[in-house]
Amino acid sequence: MKNKLLYLLSIGGLLLTLASCGGNKANQDTEKNDSTQATDSSQTSKNMNTTTSKDVHTFAQADQAVMTDLALDIKVDFDTKQIKGKATITIDNLGKTNKLYLDTKELGIEKVTLGDDEKETKFALGETKAHMGVPLEIDITPDTKKVNVYYQTSPKAEALQWLNPQQTAGKKQPFLFTQSQAILARSWVPCQDSPGIRFTYSAKVTVPKNLMAVMSAENPVEKNTEGVYNFKMPQPIPAYLLALSVGDLAFGKIGERTGVYAEPSMLEKCTYEFANMEKMLEAAEKIYGKYEWGRYDVIVLPPSFPFGGMENPRLTFATPTILAGDRSLTSLIAHELAHSWSGNLVTNKTWNDFWLNEGFTVFFERRIMEAIRGESYSEMLAKLGQQDLQGTVKSLDEKDTHLKLALKDRNPDDGMNDVAYEKGYFFLRLIAETVGKEKFDNFLKNYFAKYKFQSMDTEGFLAHLKQELPEAAKLNLDEWVYKPGLPANLPKVSATRFENVDKVYAEWDGGKKAGELNTKDWSTHEWLHFLRKLPAKVDKAKMEDLDAAFKLTDSGNSEIAAEWLSRAVPSEYDKAYPALEKFLVNVGRRKFLVPLYKSMITTEAGKKMAKEVYAKARPNYHSVSYNTLDKMIN
């Protein structure tokens, strides 16, 4: 998942350059090797874990009975806003136990049966636990291999967003999408909802005949007349990577292994924006090793999607806010593609180890940029990340600034911030600077090859690091991982390209008119650095000067627009208020919403405006966004 995407705004072009430098030969064996890539169920049942950390966010007792495969037969009902059907769960009864425990959240359980002969069995729903939902306890036998759960979701299931036609681009058909990370899969599928438990899956999904269904699996490329779609995911994944989307969709081919799904009215624009995606995949393979997932496609969702992107295997879910018309923001895809190795291939075993997913991915991005565009470019990106990290650390309780988190009795979503992304990046950067970048790159490539389709926790990674790179042991590893704040040996960042931005800002701040500033060829990163230098409250005349010269209020670049609009209300720059309201009503991406609403509520007039706009906008937001914003606004 990418909440922090400003680092990636140019990586699409960079990866394209890398691909052309290293050759364009695609891996032609990927599809035919799918069956050999998947881990067999006996391996999966042992969970292939390298460590013994306990996941405090699941009711599953996986050391006794663990799920190895999921087969869904479900119907999507837009009238009732429910998914109804059967989940057949194959298990490995390791402990020869008489009980199986699954995670659920507001699911209606009709009945449970065992085996292919569907013998009905007893089940019980336990007490509700905050954030985690309700355990489903099922009576089984030591010989049970299959459990069939007949169920239906709640119309308010947190993972599901049901959109009416007016909330879509086409305005004619409804739309549904899921967001399972971190522990929301249990609100639409009874399962063992832990990143440390992996399983293969298949699905039969029935939808209205004029709509198409796609999943994080092998997908159709056109609608059928029956409205029944069959899916298969042969590689084992954790539950948070279960994904489903249903809508008026069309498919556009990009390359032999890549393509894009979108509403028909948006498809041409999307295929243009993502034209370099096949080259990006080829380039990523040269750096990380073989792509293990068959195809890599993207679906562009309606704007209420709460994140920039979600790395669902085979099918990245992406926000339409990256459709700027000039391919300047579509490099978000590179981050989600990188997750095909860091996160999807080797996964954090618990949400306390989330940095193992995101810190690694940010590190990979910047290594690519350094290799192609030089150190001055990568350092500019690292500086922006460092700024974000320092601000985040100041705003959090000390306990939440550790890399290894302690999220028991809390929503794991609380740990999805700059600490995982940026402190994780700087930790890996420190190791790379200590042992040598080339040596560390080779270490990581071998790490992914050795532990693919497995889960890893922080302790397991540190043990592997010390074994393979003993010179890293001399670093203050425990301080980085288990202590609060930022260690004294935080790697130094020298962003020389920002020196010119600082100079230009000083000229403008000193009285020079914006129209006279030399901002030619500035990247989005340089503009963000400039705008970040503005105080929260800017003199109205100064706001007008910048806006007249650079048309910031009307910017089609969502990153720049969000940074600029965050100054509108505190600065009483009412010219931007209509654009601010339009942005908040139409965009559901939490990364933008939180700072914008936070800036509004700094004044009494702004609080009133925020509540009025939020009342209009909230129905367009996913639960991931409004659960955060409700506390802030109300």
Image: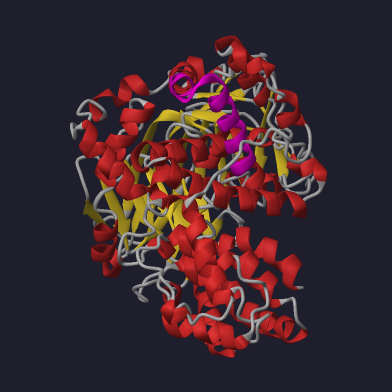
Q: Please count the marks in the image.
A: 0
* Residue 432 is one of the magenta-drawn residues: yes
In terms of secondary structure, what is the magenta stretch mainly?
helix
Please tell me which residue lies in front, 431 or 79: 431
Q: Position of residue 530 (x, y in %)?
A: 53, 65
Query: Residue 342: x, y in percent?
Result: 49, 33
Determine the residue positioned at 30% across, 49% down: 13
In which quarter of the view is residue 335 placed? top left
Residue 606 found in image quarter: bottom right
Relative to 430, residue 106 above or below: below
**How is this picture coloured?**
secondary structure
What residue sits 38% from the left and 45% below the top? 315
Observer-nearest of 293 and 572: 572
Pick the front one: 197 or 108: 197
Near-viewer residue (98 or 154): 154
Q: Position of residue 149 (x, y in %)?
A: 57, 39
The residue shown at (28%, 38%) is 18
Residue 160 is a magenta residue = no
- The answer to whether residue 563 is visible is no
Drawn side of residue 200 relative to residue 185, left or right: left
Q: Residue at image x 71%, y 49%?
A: 414
Which quadrant would residue 212 be assigned to in this image? bottom left
Return the x and y of residue 50 as percentages of the image width and height.
Answer: 60, 16
| Quadrant of image for the C terminus | bottom right
Q: Left or right: 571 with respect to 359?
A: right
Q: What stretch of residues is rendered in magenta?
A: 421-442
Residue 105, placed above or below residue 145 = below
In this view of the protein, can residue 442 be seen by the observer? yes
